[in-house]
Amino acid sequence: MHLLLHPLAKPLALVLLCAPGATLLWGAAAGQLGANPAEALIRSLGDWALRFLCLTLAVTPLRLWTGWHALARFRRMLGVASFFYAVLHFLAYAWLDMGLYLDDILRDIGKRPFILVGFAALLGLLPLAATSFNRAIRALGAARWQRLHRLVYVIAPLALLHFYWMRAGKNDFVEVYVYAAIVAVLLMARLARARRAGPAATRRA
């Protein structure tokens, strides 16, 4: 656990969080993303947004189960990474699929439920990312900040639904079930903790 407190732990974590995006952008520039690079880039960025969202949700349960309380130092960083990749996912779709034509993007969001759900998840992440620094916590107050950040437990199912509908077109649900199981376990762990500790813990969670 002492490694998590090392001064280089956060810079190293930042490098690791940026690495998938840098690898994908390099692959796109070098023509190494397969026969349909636009689709590969859009989907891979979305996959990483979901992965980092799951890791964000996992921090508190892992901290409690393992006693590695220093993991909390990385929770906000993971949350911001999830938002960053979700934004890149949307921008790649808006550019590579829709040519950055705003009217077409809005029309597409309105007529395709899986894009609407994904966009709703992105909008939900926006206030969480915008309040992910200490000054925002002081301005909102800890209790209000915590209530706002419970939105992640609405955002996660929306992101999963977006992922499910996206994979439904290819009838490929294996990864969907894996992510759904992870999110379900993490949500149940949080609910179980709140029930054990009673109403006071629920207010603090």
Image (spheres, rainbow, N blue to C red):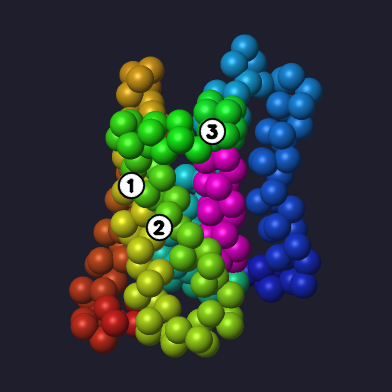
- Mark 1 is on which residue type? Leu
Q: CA distance from mark 2 to mark 3?
A: 23 Å
In front here: 50 or 186?
Answer: 50
Give how far across and how far down residue 94 sits, in percent.
54, 35
Quadrant location of the C terminus in the rendered image: bottom left
Element assignment for label 1: helix
Q: Which mark is residue 124?
A: 2
Where residue 149 is drawn, which disc sits there?
none
The quadrant of the picture occupied by the N terminus is: bottom right
Residue in the picture at 53% in, 26% down: 97
Res 129 seen here = yes
Q: What is the secondary structure assignment of the residue under circle 3?
A: loop
Instruction: Residue at 78%, 23% (x, y): give it.
Output: 30
Disc on res. 158: 1
Up-down relation of residue 81 to residue 31 (above or below): below
Front residue of 6 and 145: 145
What secondary structure is the magenta-colored segment mainly?
helix
Q: Does 96 lie within the magenta span?
A: no
First along the sequence among labels 1 and 2? 2
**First to last magenta residue range:** 74-91
Q: Residue at x 50, y 38 (%)?
A: 102
Q: Secondary structure at mark 2?
A: helix
Nearer the N terminus, badge 2 or badge 3?
Answer: 3
Number of the label disc, if any, that sits on residue 101: 3
Q: Is residue 68 visible?
A: no
Q: Are marks 2 and 3 in contact (CB under 8 Å)?
A: no
**Magenta residue check for 85:** yes
Q: Position of residue 128 (x, y in %)?
A: 47, 65
